[in-house]
């Protein structure tokens, strides 16, 4: 057996360990089956380009055992996977930092081991781990992919360091590093959001209190580990302007945690609208999601063009494109629980459909405010039915279309290329256009 095949098997084993740790939270977890059934594209994340044929064979075998849990969602995921897989071929290699290099290091093995110890608890870190490997619109891999596609679509305008150019795929080595940095920052942010405010009154059972404390330690150290690697990698690019740019994106992520109302566990709650509720939903939702994600993707796209020597105008195009794409992406995520037509599906109380309904009828806040002490006091099925029968879903679809169209319009500044087509396909795969 070749060394590459051995490495591939070890990498897949490590990914399964992470998946197993993330999907054994409790029998009531509504998404665990999705995680187990939707690892197609992640196989590409842990194999080299030379092993894609083997990965295709494994995916063919796995697809025979998949279970359809809704024609609409299954169809969307298929289109999304195809768009991402085709885009990966354009940039020449899997883009996620969930690569063999990352999966085979000792720190990752320790994280997987400790995550398994949390199996059976309700610690939010397990949900973050699910999101890391979930094969849908909210997976982390495509963030780095978009940065690389933007890099390739724009080309190298004025690059003085010939050794930085990867001529086989048409992007700079520094741009690929930036793509990995983007993913690690995003992931560390989600892991840190898995921290739980510890109050003994909330966890009277000593065993449960100990589990939550242990989970907090793992969430804190794992997020810090990723941020530490991010800092080292960013400094290694030796570009002061880029360091400042990405630092402001990290600052925005931190600021997002202090926007809007919070419950006792720091879960976000909708703000109380003023007497004039005009544009309440759009302003509230946009502020929250620009700070918590769109700023990072936009500034990463801008940074990729800066590394290639493009002028300020082109860099600004990259920033605005990344921002609108991220907002369209988030709108698609907000819509997904309401497309399934299942009131037991978890959803965010500050998602776009809920905020649009509050703008239409503020009385919904009466039920939401029951969660000020604990989010568990909120009657989610009741809110779900109220929002589903209101105008919020259609208004969210319209907002998604607007952001998708703006992102599509900005692609017109680039010459026709496979990378430009791949970016357009990703936008179409999210739906809305």
Image (tube, rainbow, N blue to C red):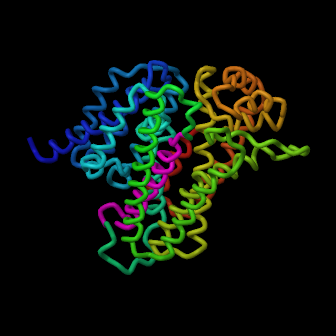
Specify the farthest residue to the left.
1
Q: Is residue 377 left or right of residue 112?
A: right
Q: Residue at x 38, y 67 (%)?
A: 174
Q: Is residue 205 left or right of residue 133?
A: right
Depth check: 388 or 261 in front?
261
Query: Can residue 7 be seen at all in this image of the molecule?
Result: yes
Provide residue 315's location: percent of width, then percent of height.
56, 69
Tell me the chief SS of the magenta region: helix
Q: Residue at x 18, y 45 (%)?
A: 7
Provide residue 31's location: percent of width, then percent of height.
48, 26
Q: Is residue 172 magenta?
A: yes
Provide residue 334's location: percent of width, then percent of height.
62, 36
Q: Is residue 8 left or right of residue 325?
A: left
Query: Can residue 79 be seen at all in this image of the molecule?
Result: no
Q: Is residue 377 magenta?
A: no
Depth check: 91 or 135 in front?
135
Depth check: 285 or 421 in front?
285
Q: Residue at x 72, y 25 (%)?
A: 383
């Amino acid at each position: 057996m070749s060394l590459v095949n051995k490495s591939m098997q070890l990498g897949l084993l490590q990914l399964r360990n992470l998946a197993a740790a993330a999907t054994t939270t409790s029998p009531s977890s509504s998404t665990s089956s999705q995680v187990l059934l939707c690892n197609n594209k992640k196989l590409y994340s842990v194999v080299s380009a030379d092993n894609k044929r083997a990965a295709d064979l494994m995916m063919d075998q796995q697809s025979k055992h998949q279970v359809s849990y809704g024609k609409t969602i299954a169809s969307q995921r298929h289109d999304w996977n195809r768009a991402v897989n085709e885009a990966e071929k354009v940039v020449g290699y899997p883009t996620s930092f969930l690569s063999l290099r990352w999966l085979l290091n000792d720190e990752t093995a320790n994280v997987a081991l400790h995550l398994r110890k949390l199996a059976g608890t309700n610690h939010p870190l397990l949900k973050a781990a699910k999101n890391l490997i979930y094969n849908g619109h909210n997976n982390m891999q495509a963030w780095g992919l978009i940065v690389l596609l933007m890099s390739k679509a724009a080309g190298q305008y004025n690059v003085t360091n010939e050794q930085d150019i990867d001529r086989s795929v048409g992007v700079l080595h520094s741009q690929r590093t930036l793509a990995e940095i983007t993913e690690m920052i995003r992931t560390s942010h989600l892991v840190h959001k898995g921290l739980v405010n510890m109050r003994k009154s909330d966890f009277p059972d000593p065993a449960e209190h100990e589990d939550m404390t242990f989970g907090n330690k793992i969430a804190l150290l794992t997020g810090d580990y990723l941020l530490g690697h991010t800092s080292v990698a960013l400094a290694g690019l030796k570009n002061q302007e880029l360091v400042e740019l990405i630092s402001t994106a990290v600052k925005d992520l931190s600021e997002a945690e202090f926007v809007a109302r919070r419950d006792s566990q720091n879960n976000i709650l909708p703000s109380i609208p003023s007497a004039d509720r005009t544009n309440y939903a759009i302003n509230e939702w946009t502020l929250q999601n620009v700070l918590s994600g769109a700023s990072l993707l936009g500034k990463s796209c801008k940074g990729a063009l800066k590394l290639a020597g493009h002028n300020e105008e082109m860099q600004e195009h990259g920033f605005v494109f990344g921002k609108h794409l991220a907002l369209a992406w988030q709108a698609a995520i907000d819509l997904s629980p309401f497309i399934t037509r299942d009131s037991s599906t978890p959803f965010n109380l500050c998602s776009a459909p809920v905020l649009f309904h509050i703008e239409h009828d503020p009385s919904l806040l009466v039920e939401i405010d029951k969660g000020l002490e604990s989010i568990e006091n909120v009657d989610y099925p009741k809110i779900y039915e109220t929002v589903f029968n209101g105008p919020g879903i259609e208004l969210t679809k319209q907002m998604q279309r607007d952001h998708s169209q703006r992102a599509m319009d900005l692609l017109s500044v680039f010459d026709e290329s496979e990378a430009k087509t791949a970016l357009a396909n990703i936008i179409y795969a999210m739906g809305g256009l």
